[in-house]
Amino acid sequence: MAGSFALNTGASIPSVGLGTWQIKPEVVGDTIYAAVKAGYRHIDCAPAYSNETEVGLALKKLFEDGVAKREELFITSKLWSGNHAPEDVPEAIDTTLKDLQLDYLDLFLIHGPIRIRKGTTHIPENLIPTDIPATWGAMEKLYDSGKARAIGVSNFTCKKMEDLLAVARVPPAVNQVECHLIWQQAKLRELCQSRGVHLSAHSPLGEASVLRNPIVAAVAEKLQKTPAQVALRWDLQMGQSVLPRSGNEGRIKENFDILIVPQCTAMRNRLAWL
Ligand code: A2P
């Protein structure tokens, strides 16, 4: 199983990345440091996670300590829903770059096909109509400038993807969505694969719900792997990179240790029933 997948930009995205959603600012630095030491090369961030400053401090320390070089890491961040106005997009990436202490991102995603008034919170009263073609135009300029080496979207359905692909000058490189054995995203995967868009799986453990599935548990027992490893490996074999989230060093290592499991036809056949 490859350690990375090719993007339509010509770059590669690591197969396994660390999700940082809901990892508290006071622990996210140690978590990232441990993950990169364990071999992770992709960190998935967002200003909405309220921990990018601490992620930036950890990255700086990793570079200073010689654990990894900038060019060896793949760093993703996202455009928040309050910053969709084309004139707000450059400022949004500049804030993220400053917080992360970086001068470019490997991937910058529209966080979701949802827009709220600038500076407001994510409640229904603050929703306003999206203008994805206009927002995407501003994302394309970031790609042209080199501040974002790839651009993409997150949480886009088939319809939203088709609408975007119809107007994009620079096609999205990635659609990052929740994707796992219980929510397999078959139609979206087919669409993305046919249009050269890499599907990346956030919440690949279904926020741990997949781990309680009895078939996953049975397969794990048979293969002498953990349920999390079986769940993550399914995504990889379907062609999706995974962004498991954990604040625990042992589980961080466990989730990364999935690249050398031998192919097993019986496992794939059984999982196909889910
Ligand atoms: P923890 O941070 O205590 O490890 P997802 O990535 O689908 O959002 O799931 C994240 C949730 O799954 C977190 O609650 C995390 O808890 C838990 N988790 C992550 N990795 C594992 C694992 N290998 N085994 C069990 N639970 C895990």
Image (tube, helix red, strand yellow):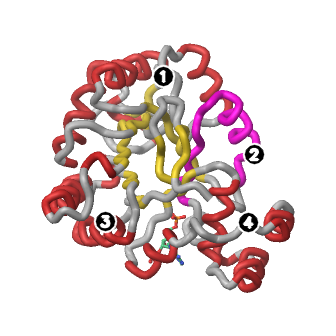
SS at circle 4: loop
Coordinates of residue 274 in the picture (x, y in percent): 81, 63
Q: Residues within 10 Å of mark 1 (few under 14, many from 20)?
A: many
Residues drawn in magenta: 184-203
Q: Three-letter amino acid code at disc 3? A: Ile
Residue receiving disc 3: 32
Q: CA distance from mark 1 to mark 4?
A: 40 Å
Q: Residues within 10 Å of mark 2 (few under 14, many from 20)?
A: few
Q: Residues within 10 Å of mark 3 (few under 14, many from 20)?
A: many
Q: Who is closer to the viewer here, 146 or 201?
A: 146
Residue receiving disc 1: 132
Q: Three-letter amino acid code at disc 2? A: Ala
Report the side of 104 relative to 221 (left or right): left
SS at circle 3: helix
Q: Three-letter amino acid code at disc 4? A: Gln
Residue receiving disc 2: 186
Q: Earlier in the sequence, mark 3 or mark 4?
A: 3
Q: Quadrant of residue 121?
A: top left
Q: Earlier in the sequence, mark 3 or mark 1?
A: 3
Which callout, 2 or 1, points to the residue nearer the camera? 2
Which callout, 1 or 4, points to the residue nearer the camera? 4
Report the side of 166 relative to 137 (left or right): right
Coordinates of residue 78 in the picture (x, y in percent): 37, 41
Q: CA distance from mark 3 to mark 2?
A: 31 Å
